């Protein structure tokens, strides 16, 4: 396997100083990343998830050379990011969902023109990339608009284009769909999928949105307290987290809780509406068929497990040995 | 790449990035020429008032600390012009603290250019030339009106002092920015040193107490921006009875300040990259 990103026992320890009294300060060491090891091959799309404060952003910051690791070995494209930050910058693209890399008060196109010169992108290549990105991300009408006037979704698309003008080999996305509406989310996901298939760009994506992962990632890594909890396919995550989907059924009238044996259990009843939980690894079809056959059904919907719940369950049950996890 | 090669590469890349970013802001400013022209004129008037205050003072007295009006104008012109240049070139670095606070510093660290060049060139404010122009006008008046026995050395010392002064102020601005890596709210403290120092230098050293002059000479060497070289040009007693050769010291002081500011910046950036805050 051509390991493009390599981490071996990477650690990041922060000294946190806290005021505890008038002049007393307490010093405490926080291990944001604690012995993290993984590799990502060229061309992979990997979802990187975990609760807030799990160490996701810290990992991304070490991978981009913003932060220097406290220990362990880290390589991206054979480069040590902390030592050769500017050399690495030519080969990576970064999108921070929460803050923009665009020049805030200037028209969008200015950010691209500057990147053209700063990254020394050959003219023909720049024009070709810009045209393609403008078309795919629908930016034509926004190029002359100052960045501060763009909506969140527009800005995100603008940011993604800026991160890709110099043909980076790897793209880091930190919460790229946070705060976006459904249409914008779909557009961003579609674009990232195409980018990966057509250009072979390696993508590392941190997100809270399980759908981002489902649409894009063949592999997902879960981290908590700076340690790897799970590394493998998404389906395995559901099993590892023993996650459940929810079937919401609207019956014709108020009825006692539906009994379908061990296949599902009713978790909530509200008038004619009932909520049934069933394992995420099972198909909903037989369950729906059985309920429809035995009960007066008006309407139904299936709710996917939310990522926090899946992960939460996983943390609650740490003793479980999960495939690919390097820490137990 | 050796340490030296790396440093030279950093300087070259930094200067290149600086020009690119500053150029972008200048083009953006120039898109509204009329508004820019008006900003310049009003800037000139406002900074002009600053000197009017000194003129008013001289309508009551003939000398200030033994310095005549053209002589004070000489001090003022050197200080205001060199500070103006430093502020134009590198003043934006003073916003580093807010960048650390809101996390936008990270976005600079993922670009292939030195961070200092990026923060210094950000929002490059061409309107700051109004202060330089005003300072230069006062300096021109001073040169025309003072009764100086011009020698080659004195003539050469004026531009050398101007450039050295700008570099010293620039180093102070960089050091102040570096300090903001550790104390993000230190922008005010920095202003006290830069703007305060600049105002201080507009008056002759003879009006201040010895302790203050000593501090401004040895601890925080702003005296070399104008006081010491001006004493030579104007044939005045040197502050603190410094030896005569110190009049030629401004370039050396400037280089030393740059080295210290550079070290401070590197230490600040290193601490940021190890703590992330």
Image: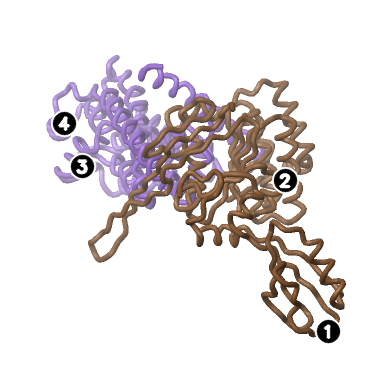
Chain colours: A brown, B purple
Q: Position of residue A237 (x, y in %)?
A: 61, 52
Q: Return the chain for callout 2.
A: A
Number of other residues with Cα within 10 Å of mark 1, as a class: few under 14, some 14 to 19, many 20 or more:
few
Q: Position of residue B167 (x, y in %)?
A: 36, 29
Lateral position of residue A10 relative to residue B218, left or right: right
Marks 4/3 same chain: yes
Q: Nearer the viewer, mark 3 or mark 2?
A: 2
Gap between marks 3 and 2 measured at Cα: 72 Å
- Answer whether labels 1 and 3 touch (C-beta < 8 Å): no
Q: Quadrant of residue A113?
A: top right
Q: Quadrant of residue A210?
A: bottom right
Residue appearing at x 50%, y 37% in the figure: A63
Q: Position of residue B33 (x, y in %)?
A: 65, 38
* Residue receiving disc 4: B237
Who comes first in sequence, dot 4 or dot 3? 3
Number of other residues with Cα within 10 Å of mark 3, as a class: few under 14, some 14 to 19, many 20 or more:
few
Looking at the picture, tell me which residue is in the foreground, B121 or A2.
A2
Assign the N terminus of chain A to one quadrant of the image.
Answer: top right
- Answer whether labels 4 and 3 touch (C-beta < 8 Å): no
Q: Nearer the viewer, mark 4 or mark 1?
A: 1
Lateral position of residue A73 relative to residue A173, left or right: left
Looking at the picture, tell me which residue is in the foreground, B5 or A85.
A85
User: Which disc is residue A189 wearing?
Assistant: 2
User: Which disc is residue B65 wearing?
Assistant: 3
Q: Nearer the viewer, mark 1 or mark 3?
A: 1
Lateral position of residue A223 relative to residue A125, left or right: left
Q: Residue furthest left?
A: B241
Q: Element type at marker 2?
A: helix
């Amino acid at each position: 396997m051509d390991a493009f990103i390599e981490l071996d026992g990477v650690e990041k320890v922060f000294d946190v100083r806290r005021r505890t009294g008038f002049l007393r300060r307490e010093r405490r060491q926080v291990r944001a990343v604690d012995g993290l090891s993984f590799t990502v091959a060229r061309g992979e799309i990997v979802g990187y998830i975990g609760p807030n404060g799990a160490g996701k952003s810290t990992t991304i910051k070490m991978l981009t050379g913003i932060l220097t690791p406290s220990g362990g070995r880290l390589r991206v494209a054979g480069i040590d990011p902390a030592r050769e930050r500017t050399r690495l910058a030519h080969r990576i693209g970064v999108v921070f969902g929460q803050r923009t890399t665009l020049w805030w008060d200037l028209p969008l196109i200015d950010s691209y023109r500057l990147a053209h010169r700063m990254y020394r992108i050959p003219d023909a290549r720049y024009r070709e990339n810009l045209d393609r990105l403008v078309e795919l991300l629908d930016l034509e009408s926004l190029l002359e608009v100052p960045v501060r006037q763009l909506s969140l979704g527009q800005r995100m698309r603008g940011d993604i284009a800026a991160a890709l003008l110099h043909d980076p080999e790897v793209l880091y996305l930190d919460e790229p769909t946070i705060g976006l509406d459904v249409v914008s989310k779909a557009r961003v996901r579609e674009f990232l999928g195409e980018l990966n298939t057509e250009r072979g760009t390696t993508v590392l994506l941190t997100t809270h949105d399980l759908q981002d992962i489902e649409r894009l990632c063949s592999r997902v890594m879960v981290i908590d307290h700076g340690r790897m909890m799970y590394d493998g396919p998404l389906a395995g995550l559901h099993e590892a987290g023993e996650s459940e989907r929810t079937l919401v059924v609207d019956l014709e009238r108020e009825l006692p809780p539906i009994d379908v044996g061990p296949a599902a259990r009713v978790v909530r009843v509200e008038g004619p509406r009932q909520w049934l939980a069933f394992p995420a690894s099972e198909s909903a079809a037989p369950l729906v068929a059985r309920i429809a056959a035995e009960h007066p059904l008006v309407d139904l919907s299936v709710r996917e497990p939310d990522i926090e719940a899946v992960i939460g369950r996983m943390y609650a049950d740490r003793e479980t040995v999960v495939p690919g996890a390097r820490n137990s | 790449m050796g340490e030296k090669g790396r440093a030279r590469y950093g300087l070259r890349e930094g200067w290149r990035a600086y020009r690119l970013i500053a150029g972008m802001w200048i083009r953006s400013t120039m898109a509204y020429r009329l508004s820019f022209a008006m900003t310049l004129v009003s800037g000139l008037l406002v900074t002009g008032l600053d000197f009017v205050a000194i003129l008013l003072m001289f309508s009551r007295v003939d000398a200030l600390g033994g310095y005549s009006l053209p002589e004070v104008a000489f001090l003022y012109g050197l200080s205001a012009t060199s500070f103006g240049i430093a502020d134009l070139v590198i003043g934006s670095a003073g916003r580093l603290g807010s960048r650390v606070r809101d996390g936008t510093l990270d976005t600079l660290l993922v670009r292939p250019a030195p961070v200092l060049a990026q923060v210094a060139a950000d929002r490059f404010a061409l309107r700051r030339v109004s202060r330089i122009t005003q300072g230069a006008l006062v300096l021109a008046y001073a040169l025309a009106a003072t009764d100086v026995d011009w020698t080659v050395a004195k003539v050469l010392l004026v531009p050398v002092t101007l450039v050295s002064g700008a570099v010293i102020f620039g180093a102070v601005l960089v050091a102040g920015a570096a300090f903001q890596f550790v104390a993000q709210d230190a922008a005010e403290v920095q202003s006290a040193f830069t703007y305060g120092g600049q105002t201080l230098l507009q008056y002759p050293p003879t009006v201040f107490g010895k302790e203050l002059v000593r501090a401004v000479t040895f601890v925080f060497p702003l005296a070399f921006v104008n006081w010491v070289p001006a004493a030579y040009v104007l044939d005045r007693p040197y502050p603190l009875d410094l030896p005569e050769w110190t009049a030629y010291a401004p370039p050396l002081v400037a280089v030393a300040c740059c080295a210290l500011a550079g070290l401070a910046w590197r230490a600040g950036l290193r601490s940021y990259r190890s703590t992330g805050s």
